[in-house]
Amino acid sequence: MTVDVWFRHAAAAYGFAVGVLAVLLAGVEVFFDWTTPIEINVSIVYGLPLVLAAMARSRRLLWGLTLFLGFTIFAVYYAQTPPDIFSMRERSFVDRELSAITLLVMAGLLHARIVAIDAIHEQRRLLKAKNVELEAANRALTQREEKIARQNTDLDRRRREAEEGSDRKTRLLAAVSHDIRTPVSAISVMAEVIRRSSDDPALAAQVPGLAQRLQANARALAGLVSDVLDASSFGSGRVSLRSMEFSLNELLAEGCDRLRSLAETKGLRLVVELPEPAIWLRTDTVSLGRILSNLLSNAIKFTEHGSVTVSTEQTGQQVVLIHVSDTGSGIAPECLPLLFDEVVQMSNPERDRSKGWGLGLAICRRLAAAIGGNVTVKTHLNQGSVFSVHLPAACVVDRPNETVSRCSRTRTARDRLRPTGSS
C-alpha cells in the first residue's frame, strides 16, 4: 500500500468517525432540549454538531443536521408552550428564532469553509498530479538529453575515426605513390638500357645483369601492389579465409626455398630447423605463407652479415610458435610501438623503401589476427631481432600415424635448404 492510498483511507476513517460523533452530539442536545423546561434554551449550542460535520467535510451531513436541528428548535417550543401564551413576540420564541438564524448562518459559513478546503485540496491534488507529470517529462527529457549526448559522443568518435582513417589513407597513398615511382623509374631506365644494348654488341654482356635487376624491381613493384591490396582488403573488412590441413614443415621448407636465392645474393646463411615429428595445422595456408614470406623478406633485407634462421616450437598448451630470427641491426626501442603501423617507416626521411619496414609487418599482424594468432617481436639494437608467430592450439591437428614417405620428403627438403657446413 502506497503512502497516498494510506492517507486516503485514514482521512475517510477520520471523516466517518467525526460524522458519527456529530450525529450523536446532535441527538444528545435534542434529548436535553425536549426534557428541559422551555426557559432553558438548549438550542443555542445546536451549532456544535455542525462544527463536527464541517470537520468531517460532509456537506450533506452539515445541511441534514441544520434542517433537523432547525425543525427541532421550533418543534420543542411548540410542544412545551401552552397555546394561550404562544406568541411570536414572546421571549422564548424570540430566543428560538435567534438560535435558528445563528444555526443557518453557521451552516452557511461552515459550508463555505468546506468548499474552500475542498477547492484547496483539489488544487493540491491537481498540482501534485501536474508535478508528477512534470517530473516524468523531466525524466524523459533528461533521458533524451543523455541519449542525445551519447549519440553525439558516438558521432564524434565515429567522426574522429573517419578523419583518422582518411588521414591514414591519405598518408598511405602518399607513401605508396612515392614508393611506386622508384621501381617504375628503375624498370623504365633498365628497359631503355636493355633496348640500347640490343643494338650495341659491346653492351650485350650487361643484358643478363640488367634483366636480373629489372626482374627484381618488377617483383618489388608487384609486392608493393599486393601489400596495398591486402591493406585495402583489411580496411574494408573483405578478408576471406580458407582453412585446410597441411604440414607446417612443408610450408616452412617451401617458403625458405623461394627466398634462398635472395639470401645467397647477400651472402647470408638461411637456416631452417624443422621439428620432428612434423607439426600439422588446420588454418588458412595462404595467409600463414604470406606471414612467413613477409617476415623472411624483412629479415633478409635488414641483415647485412650472418644468418637468418627459421625455427618452431610447441608449448605445453599446444600453442605453436614460429620464430624468424636474424643477426641484423635490430630495432630501436622508441620505434617498437609503431612497428606494425601501415604507414610509419623507421629512420626513413627520404622514403627509401629499402630502409623502412613498409606495409609487410602491419599485414602480418592483421593476417595473424584473422587466423586467430598474433605476431610479436624481441629485438636488441645492433644484435638482431626475433619475430614470433603465435598460432593457437585450435589450429593444431593430431596426426600420429603419419607415413614414413611424407616424413622422408620433409627431411629431404630440410637437408636441401640447409647450407653446406651448417649443423
Image (cartoon, helix red, strand yellow):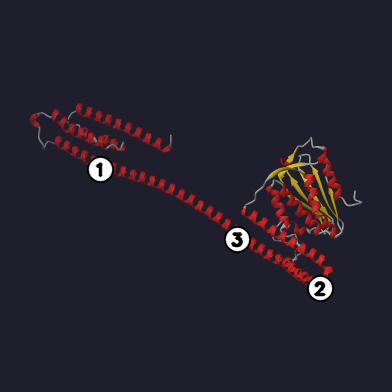
Residue 277 appearing in the image: no
Q: Quadrant of the N terminus?
A: top left
Of 191 and 327, the residue lying toward us: 191
Q: Is residue 80 above or below residue 360?
A: above
- Callout in the foreground (3, 1): 3
**Residue 69 picture location, percent across and down:** 21, 33
Q: Which mark is residue 200?
A: 2
Q: Earlier in the sequence, mark 2 or mark 3?
A: 3
Of 272 and 112, the residue lying toward us: 272
Q: Which mark is residue 163?
A: 3
Q: Amino acid at mark 2?
A: Asp
Whole-Å distance between the Cαs marked 2 and 3? 55 Å
Whole-Å distance between the Cαs marked 1 and 2? 133 Å
Q: Which mark is residue 333?
A: none
Q: Is residue 267 above or below residue 75?
A: below
Circle count: 3
Q: Residue at x 73, y 55 (%)?
A: 361
Q: Amino acid at mark 3?
A: Glu
**Residue 99 picture location, percent across and down:** 19, 37
